[in-house]
Image: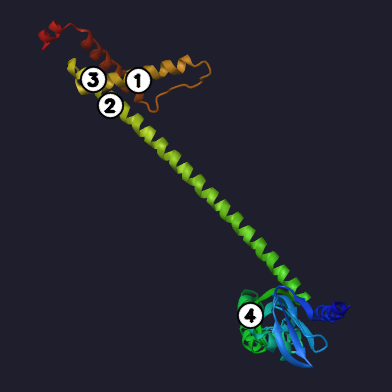
Amino acid sequence: MENLFYLIPIALILYFGLFVVNQQTTAIVERFGKFTSIRQSGLQFKIPLVDKISGRVSLKIQQLDVIVETKTKDDVFVQLKISVQFQILREKVYDAFYKLQNPHDQITAYIFDTVRAEVPKMKLDDVFEKKDDIAQAIQRELKESMLAYGYDIVKALVTDIDPDAQVKEAMNRINAAEREKLAAQFEGDAQRILIVERAKAEAESKRLQGMGIADQRREIARGLEESVDVLNKAGINSQEASALIVITQHYDTLQSIGSDTNSNLILLPNNPNAASSMLNDMVTSLVAANKINEPPALKRNKE
């Protein structure tokens, strides 16, 4: 019985004195209303009826979203949604618990003050382009101000920019017009590129065609030159050789035209003297042909 008499008070002291502090949390212990200690995570002990847990402080990162309405330099009302991430420094839990009653209201006030100081300096387009600068200004201002209360500002972000409804509608119309203009420009560029490429292809085709014609003419000239050389070796002068080649080509052409059943082409002299000239060429050609057919001995006797 005596042992049980001693065990009951001990059990009551342990029951009311032991407490647990969770991870990333601290407990503020006061004795008769006066700060005593800050207890870290784990199993802790306080004197029953003497010590009291005045509060628990979370060391986790917290987030606060604030919507601020203000006016830009070009007189456009705009709403900015600001997200601020903050946490209490472990070494400054005392300051965070005792110095600041409502940290959310304090942070919100600094956000409003900073945004309404920065945004009125900018036009609406600059607000969209420089939202990171606005966020950095908010973070810098909060960091300097809240450090005295034991708070560290981890990050500040401008997550949304919402202009006035009429301005937003006008911006949508402008964006639609810009997109149509850009599409028309791209279409025009594509047409120009197509025309240029088509012209390049046509020019290349004509160049290749010209090269083919030039090669053909060179081969024809080379063949004529070789024919004249052969006739010259046979004792025919250049004039007679030329006449013979012309007449030969003339009759070859007539033969090719005559072989085509669908041809209705008729060749006529283009001047009154053409028939006489053709007759002379034919006589000259016949003389040259006879020279070719003469035996070599007879040619030497004539010479």
Of mark 3 and mark 1, the one earlier in the sequence is 3
Residue 164: percent from left, percent from top: 76, 77
Q: Tell me if mark 3 has few (under 14), some (14-19) or many (20+) residues whose alpha carbon lies within 10 angstroms of its own.
A: many
Of mark 4 and mark 2, the one earlier in the sequence is 4
Q: Which is more toward the observer, 277 or 260? A: 260
Tell me the element at label 1. helix
Contact between marks 1 and 2 (CB within 8 A): the answer is: no
Q: Nearer the viewer, mark 4 or mark 2?
A: 4
Q: Is residue 77 above or below residue 226?
A: below
Alpha carbon separation for disc pair 4 and 2? 84 Å
Contact between marks 3 and 1 (CB within 8 A): the answer is: no
Of mark 1 and mark 4, the one earlier in the sequence is 4
Q: Which corner quadrant holds the N terminus?
A: bottom right
Alpha carbon separation for disc pair 2 and 3? 18 Å
Residue bearing the label numbered 2 = 222
Residue 208 visible in the shown view: yes
Of mark 1 and mark 2, the one earlier in the sequence is 2
Contact between marks 4 and 2 (CB within 8 A): the answer is: no
Describe residue 251's horizontal placement relative to residue 132 as left or right. Answer: left
Residue bearing the label numbered 3 = 240
Of mark 2 and mark 3, the one earlier in the sequence is 2
Q: Nearer the viewer, mark 1 or mark 4?
A: 4
Residue bearing the label numbered 1 = 249
Q: Where on the picture, by quarter, is residue 177?
A: bottom right
Residue 248: percent from left, percent from top: 33, 17
Tell me the element at label 4. helix
Residue 97: percent from left, percent from top: 73, 87
Q: Where on the picture, by quarter, is residue 152?
A: bottom right
- In this figure, what is the number of numbered marks? 4
